[in-house]
Amino acid sequence: MKIWNRLFGKNNEKVKEANLPTPITPEEETLAPAPYDYGLDELGIFLSSRDYGWTAPDKSHKKVILTNPLDCKEKICLMGMVSAWRGTGHTEWEVILGGWFILAVLDAIEKNVNEADITNLFNRDFLASRDRVFTQAQVYEHLIKWFDIVEETDEVLKLRIHI
């Protein structure tokens, strides 16, 4: 029984010392936090099936502008967008839509502007094997519930995402 007391005993000073937290050095206190991960590195993993495509952009489609991209800073990620926008019938479409959305937001954040062009999400049909198609109209119906329409004209649709 003495061996158990030496290994796991409460009176063993070495055990007490080993359980103490390591003090943080002044250098560690000043380290910058890791940059926020938007998850775009995962695009290649999800799209490795190569079972996706899209039609050429519809040039007659109105421009779609996100009016609050700065509100998305450090609040969105690829997996979150895929989860939120699931239900298209094909995971790769959700990944592409989420990835394009994040890229547009990151471009606006980098430029520090309050508008991001997200037309690519809405101006084409998405394709997959076995003749599956997710049409422009279906994309609009699927995604619009995540946005408020700020303004709509014949040329422009301005949206605000619920964040």
Image (spheres, helix red, strand yellow):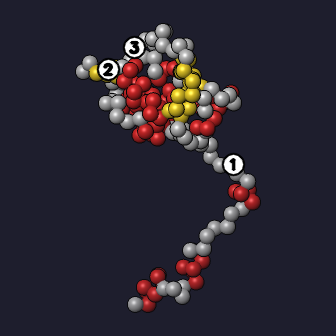
Q: Quadrant of residue 49?
A: top left
Q: Amino acid at mark 2?
A: Val
Q: Separation of disc 1 and disc 2 at Cα? A: 45 Å
- Place of residue 33 in the rendered image (x, y in percent of width and height, measured from the top left): 65, 49
Dot 1 alpha-carbon crowd within 10 angstroms: few under 14, some 14 to 19, many 20 or more: few
- Mark nearer the N terminus (1 vs 2): 1
- Mark nearer the N terminus (3 vs 1): 1
Residues at marks 2 and 3 touching, judged by CB atoms closer than 8 Å: no
Mark 1 — residue?
A: 32
Dot 3 alpha-carbon crowd within 10 angstroms: few under 14, some 14 to 19, many 20 or more: few
Residues at marks 3 and 1 touching, judged by CB atoms closer than 8 Å: no
Task: Locate residue 121 relative to residue 155 in the image: left or right.
Answer: left
Quarter that holds the N terminus: bottom left
Task: Locate residue 65 relative to residue 55 in the image: left or right.
Answer: right
Quarter that holds the C terminus: top right
Circle 2 sits in a helix, a strand or a loop, which is it?
strand
Above or below, 159 relative to 7:
above
Q: Residue at x 45, y 11 (%)?
A: 58
Mark 2 — residue?
A: 133
Mark 3 — residue?
A: 55
- Place of residue 143 in the rendered image (x, y in percent of width and height, measured from the top left): 43, 30
Name the residue furthest bottom.
2
Circle 1 sits in a helix, a strand or a loop, which is it?
loop
Above or below, 47 relative to 37:
above
- Place of residue 94 in the rendered image (x, y in percent of width and height, measured from the top left): 40, 31
- Mark nearer the N terminus (2 vs 3): 3
Task: Locate residue 55 relative to residue 105 in the image: left or right.
Answer: left
Residue 16's tag is none
